[in-house]
Image (tube, rainbow, N blue to C red):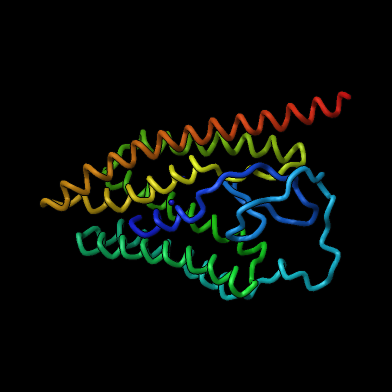
């Protein structure tokens, strides 16, 4: 369950891919995405679980203290601040600062990926922190909007149900030795739409011409983004079924 700034940042990763088998000794990412390295544009395919193990001591991917990881941690620390601004302050100024924080989180999301590639500081911890921060901001924003009655709980339920469905698919894939599928173009577009919609809806909760315009625009993007979100889920399920079917046919030969 992805902001004027964050939406643009999310678009940097609009690419499609396929699942990759789980590698022994390596962590996995979220149900929505499991890149090999931050910012990677492809994944290894067709390799059985346990085919590759990290046998070399001092594995660079095992690093914890890196500049990109520090940025990701700072982004995570901004989540409670965001919640305080929108649920504690509840003023136009507070909402404006909350939107600024979302934009800053989006810029940092782009920055840590850029630095990870430029400095050669990609790591498994970074692969976990990056999507975790994105999802926490999405969840915090949606729940805050619902608590303030800016959106209905029905929208929260729709988005949560989608995550629950994909969670079940992920469990099935893992039980058969596969890591999560890479997020599709449709899934990234859906996330971008939702991340644009949320701050607009916050701004639309206030009176004035700006509030009217942002409210209408925010709802349009929220509805469109939710529809795309479910379309991406259907595509994800189809890909997972194809993988499982292929494994069964291969084992039956």
Between 133 and 53, the residue placed more toward the observer is 53
Residue 72 in the image, given as x and y percentages of width and height: 52, 67
Q: Say left or right for 218 vs 141.
A: left
User: Is residue 247 depicted above or below 7 in this figure?
Assistant: above
At 41% across and 48% down in the image, what residue appears?
A: 192
At 86% across and 64% down in the image, what residue appears?
A: 55
At 54% across and 42% down in the image, what residue appears?
A: 184
Q: Quadrant of residue 171?
A: top right
**Quadrant, the C terminus:** top right
Q: Tell which residue pokes out farthest to the left in this image.
A: 208
Residue 132 in the image, given as x and y percentages of width and height: 54, 56
Residue 159 in the image, given as x and y percentages of width and height: 44, 38
User: Is residue 74 depicted above or below 27 in this figure?
Assistant: below
Number of marks present in the image shown:
0
Q: Quadrant of residue 68?
A: bottom right
Q: Say left or right for 61 vs 152.
A: right
Residue 105 in the image, given as x and y percentages of width and height: 42, 64
At 77% across and 69% down in the image, what residue appears?
A: 59
């Amino acid at each position: 369950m992805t902001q004027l700034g964050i939406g643009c940042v999310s678009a940097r990763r609009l690419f499609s891919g396929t699942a990759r088998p789980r590698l022994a000794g390596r962590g996995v990412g979220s149900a929505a995405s499991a890149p090999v390295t931050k910012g990677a544009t492809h994944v290894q395919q067709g390799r059985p679980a346990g085919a590759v193990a990290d046998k070399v001591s001092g594995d660079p991917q095992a690093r914890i203290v890196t500049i990109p990881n520090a940025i990701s941690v700072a982004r995570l620390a901004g989540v409670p601040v965001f919640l305080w601004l929108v649920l504690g302050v509840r003023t136009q100024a507070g909402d404006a600062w909350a939107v600024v924080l979302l934009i800053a989180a989006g810029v940092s999301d782009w920055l840590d990926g850029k630095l990870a590639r430029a400095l050669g500081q990609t790591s498994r911890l970074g692969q976990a922190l990056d999507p975790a921060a994105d999802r926490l901001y999405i969840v915090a924003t949606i729940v805050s909007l619902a608590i303030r009655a800016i959106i209905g709980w029905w929208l929260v339920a729709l988005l949560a149900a989608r995550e629950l469905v994909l969670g079940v698919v992920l469990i099935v894939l893992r039980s058969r030795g596969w890591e999560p599928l890479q997020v599709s173009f449709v899934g990234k577009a859906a996330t971008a739409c939702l991340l644009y919609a949320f701050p607009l809806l916050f701004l639309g909760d206030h009176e004035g011409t700006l509030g009217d315009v942002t409210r209408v625009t925010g709802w349009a993007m929220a509805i469109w983004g939710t529809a795309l979100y479910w379309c991406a889920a259907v595509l994800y399920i189809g890909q997972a079924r194809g993988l499982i079917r292929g494994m069964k046919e291969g084992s039956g030969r």
